[in-house]
Image: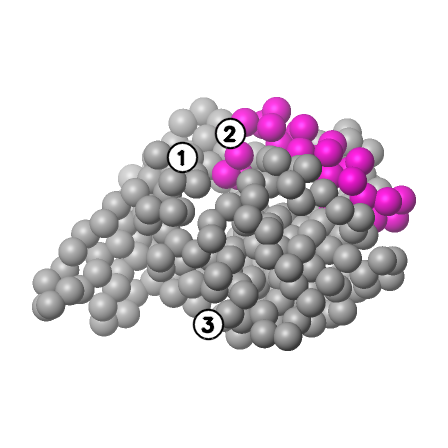
Amino acid sequence: MSVQSHYENHLAAFYAWMSGNFETKQQEQQDWFASRGVLPRGNKTAIDLGAGHGLQSVSLAKLGFTVFAVDFNQHLLSELNARAKNLPIRTVLANLKDVPQYATEAELITCMGDTRTHLESVETVKTLIGQWFALLPAGGRLALSFRDLTEELFGEQRFIPIKADDNRIHTCFLEYAPGSVRVYDQLLEKSNGEWIQKVSSYRKLRMGADFVKEMLTGAGFRVMQHDVIARMQYLLAEK
């Protein structure tokens, strides 16, 4: 199943629940942006790629940006719109690979939360980074976050509990291959007293932080910040 089909037919329906308390997670993202100086200083416009249900978009809007929130899943964008209220956020239904669909003058581009690893190949990632570089003005910034999946897990380590409550249990299972990992999202959901299992899978790229830094510098960016927070890699680069 393609990544887009996986979200449309399986993951999007429980993505917000899986992600945890929105206000808490959103504030964490806002604090990271603010502490790293990701604040409006040019045209105050940001493009948030793979915006999902809005953790980064809401954070950036609260910091003073006008945000173009881009995602290929309408369900998630509808959830984002419900949370945006009167914030300066415009949702765009588009695939991040289709740059002309969201290209606009912006001083900041963000691609957070593993979105980049959903792409088909390393070459696709390199091409996109080059296109984002061209889209930004001098001094424009690019913020990325992702999981470094280069270290392979074995045996029972490949079963990762994500979240559970009285009516839902979400577990991930990882199946490794050279350069990629297949992620199986298993959801057990209680219905009329019985547990119903739903399973779907999709592929993620395995690229380490150092390799991503090389792609950024190769495109012309200067890497300004590298943080590791809760096993997520955060990179901030400037043109």
Q: Earlier in the sequence, mark 2 or mark 1?
A: 1
Which numbered disc covers residue 2? Answer: 1
- What amino acid is at disc 3? Asn
Residue closer to the observer: 93 or 157: 93
Can you see residue 30?
A: no
At numbered mark 3, what does the secondary structure look like: helix, strand or loop?
Answer: loop
Q: Quadrant of residue 215?
A: top right
Magenta segment range? 117-142
Amino acid at the residue labelled 1: Ser
- Classify 14 as above or below 23: above
The kind of residue tagged 2 is Glu
- Per the model, the C-alpha gap separating discs 3 and 2 is 30 Å
Left or right of 126 in this view: 107: right
- Counting other residues with Cα less than 10 Å from the Cα at mark 2, is it few (<14), some (14-19), or many (20 or more)? some
Residue at image position (34%, 62%) is 163
Q: Residue 120 appears at what percent x and percent y?
A: 51, 29
